[in-house]
């Protein structure tokens, strides 16, 4: 059985569509939740109108996911972002079918939306490739995908409070040699979400794990943070403007290809 958990903070414009997807995907014995990460808009009203159980969670994506993970009682929990726009396929249904057919410890939903993955290109991939090579290139084109399923009973460590949660899960389960599968969700039209702090949050998740795993000397961390800050500064200059997307991406890749600092003194 699966608990379908739609995670959202003030996502009223798209919440109904996400809730409809999980309701359609659920089978007898499954559970459907809206995990409300301290929304102040009409999200509560929408969930009530759709007769979906609302789980009140703290603000912060990682906090909301951790809150759900601590409480679900089925074998699997399927996370769906509440900002899901109209898609040609039911993401929740495709993920559920994948794990029902081939049960894995984690299923990561891969998709195509034409967006420029600044944090993935500039921060996630170079840091993980250098600090956790065994966890690199195993999660599809969208390693930070919010569409994923996790099996109950695994040691997930200290899940971060913020947008570092997906990076944390990838590395933690990768190091644990968990069974991981990629599920193709197809193509859908996404929307550009300006989240300038996401790069810092993702890098913090990776660096925290690197220090605790003995991959990064704590005394060297500040140099890595300085390397990341150059990327983050560049990311803050982009707001989805197609006119500068080519030059922006070119500079992003140049910055991401710079040598990383030493991990040991």
Image (tube, rainbow, N blue to C red):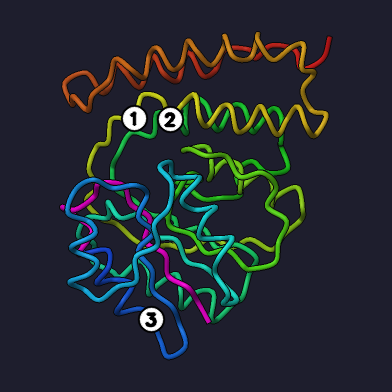
Q: CA distance from mark 1 to mark 3?
A: 31 Å
Question: Within the magenta stretch, is there residue 15?
Answer: yes
User: Which secondary structure lies at badge 1?
Assistant: loop
Relative image position of residue 67 (x, y in whole percent): 52, 55
- Residue segment shown in magenta: 1-16
Q: Nearer the viewer, residue 225 or 88?
A: 225
State left or right for residue 264 relative to residue 221: right
Q: Earlier in the sequence, mark 1 or mark 3?
A: 3
**In the rendered image, which quarter is residue 132 located in?**
top right
User: Which secondary structure lies at badge 3?
Assistant: loop
Q: Residues within 10 Å of mark 1 (few under 14, many from 20)?
A: few
Q: Which mark is residue 26?
A: 3
- Tell me, yes or no, whether the two marked residues, 1 and 2, touch with CB atoms within 8 Å: yes
Q: CA distance from mark 1 to mark 2?
A: 6 Å
User: Which secondary structure lies at badge 2?
Assistant: helix
Q: Earlier in the sequence, mark 2 or mark 3?
A: 3
Q: Residues within 10 Å of mark 3 (few under 14, many from 20)?
A: some
Q: Nearer the viewer, residue 128 or 33?
A: 33
Question: Within the magenta stretch, is there residue 14?
Answer: yes
Q: Which mark is residue 195?
A: 1
Relative image position of residue 155 (x, y in whole percent): 73, 56
Residue receiving disc 2: 198
* Residue 149 in the image: above or below residue 190: below
Relative image position of residue 94 (x, y in whole percent): 40, 72
State left or right for residue 98 relative to residue 206: left
* Residue 43 in the image: above or below residue 132: below
Q: Which mark is residue 11?
A: none
């Amino acid at each position: 059985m699966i608990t379908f958990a739609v995670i959202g903070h003030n996502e009223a414009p798209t919440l109904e569509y996400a809730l409809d997807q999980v309701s359609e995907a659920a089978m007898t014995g499954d559970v459907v939740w809206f995990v409300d990460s301290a929304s102040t808009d009409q999200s509560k009203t929408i969930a009530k109108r759709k007769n979906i159980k609302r789980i009140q969670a703290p603000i912060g994506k990682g906090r909301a996911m951790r809150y759900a993970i601590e409480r679900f009682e089925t074998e699997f929990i399927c996370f769906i972002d509440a900002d899901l726009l109209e898609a040609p396929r039911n993401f929740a249904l495709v993920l559920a079918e994948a794990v029902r057919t081939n049960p894995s410890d984690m299923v990561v939903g891969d998709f195509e939306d034409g967006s420029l993955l600044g944090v993935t290109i500039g921060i996630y991939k170079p840091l993980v490739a250098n600090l956790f090579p065994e966890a690199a290139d195993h999660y599809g084109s969208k390693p930070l995908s919010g569409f994923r399923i996790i099996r109950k009973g695994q040691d997930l460590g200290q899940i971060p409070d913020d947008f570092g949660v997906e990076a944390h899960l990838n590395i933690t389960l990768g190091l644990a040699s968990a069974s991981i599968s990629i599920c193709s969700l197809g193509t859908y039209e996404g929307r550009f979400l300006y989240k300038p702090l996401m790069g810092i949050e993702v890098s913090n998740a990776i660096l925290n794990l690197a220090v605790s795993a003995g991959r990064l000397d704590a005394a060297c961390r500040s140099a890595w943070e300085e390397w990341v800050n150059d990327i983050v500064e560049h990311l803050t200059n982009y707001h989805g403007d197609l006119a500068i997307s080519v030059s922006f991406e070119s500079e992003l890749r140049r910055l991401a290809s710079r040598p990383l600092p030493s991990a040991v003194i």
